[in-house]
Amino acid sequence: MPLKLILTAIAFGIFGVLASIGGLVSYWRFVDWLDFRRRGYRIRLLHPQTWRWQPGPQSWAYEEREANGNIRGFAFVRHFVSGGYPAKSVIRFPGPDAWSAEVPAWAGERREQIVERVLDVAGRATTRLDDAA
């Protein structure tokens, strides 16, 4: 088999793998965007250069869309206690008494709703809430 044919096959193979990976990443980003549009809220990792499910504390954000399309949110700590997928995690939020003082004014009276939303998105089976006082 001529060398040129082998190199062409290798080049097409590499191109195919890269195109497939690009397609998957695009699909995941589109599905995340679609979920955010449908729900009106999301949680997301603030520093995406870290591996998402590595054990240890990570900075996450709760965000929601306003009627005018603006996005508002606040940060919280999500501590992964194990590796793998799905990883067990603990969400750290201010306790009920400190909530209004530590979150933005728009979230002040909505603690229960926001906690429920975060647990729904994070996965109730593998996530628990830690109410920091």
Image (spheres, rainbow, N blue to C red):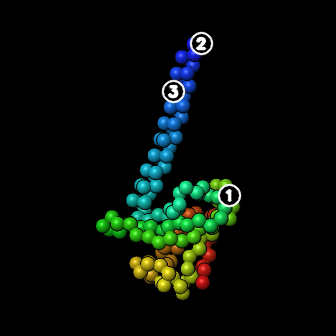
What residue did someone put label 1 on?
Answer: 83
User: Which residue type carries mark 2?
Assistant: Met
Instruction: Indicate which label's residue lies in the foreground, 3 or 1.
Output: 3
Q: Can you give x and y, in whole percent of width and height, for residue 13 in the image?
A: 54, 28
- Looking at the picture, tell me which residue is in the foreground, 100 or 40: 100
- Position of the C terminus, as image quadrant, is bottom right
Q: Can you give x and y, in whole percent of width and height, for residue 3 in the image?
A: 57, 16
In this rendering, the count of numbered labels is 3
- Position of the N terminus, as image quadrant, is top right
State the CA–CA distance, disc 3 to disc 1.
36 Å
What residue did someone put label 2 on?
Answer: 1
Q: Which mark is residue 19?
A: none
Q: Earlier in the sequence, mark 2 or mark 3?
A: 2
Q: Earlier in the sequence, mark 3 or mark 1?
A: 3
The part of the image, by quadrant, that contains residue 17 is top right
Point 38% across, 66% down: residue: 71
Please state if 10 lies on the left or on the right of 72 as rendered: right
Residue density around tag 3, few if under 14, some if 14–19, many if 20 or more, within 10 Å: few
Residue density around tag 2, few if under 14, some if 14–19, many if 20 or more, within 10 Å: few
Q: Can you give x and y, in whole percent of width and height, for residue 30 in the image?
A: 43, 50
Point 60% across, 79% down: residue: 131
Q: Can you give x and y, in whole percent of width and height, for residue 5 in the image?
A: 54, 17
Point 52% across, 68% down: residue: 118
Point 50% across, 31% down: residue: 15
What residue did someone put label 3 on?
Answer: 12
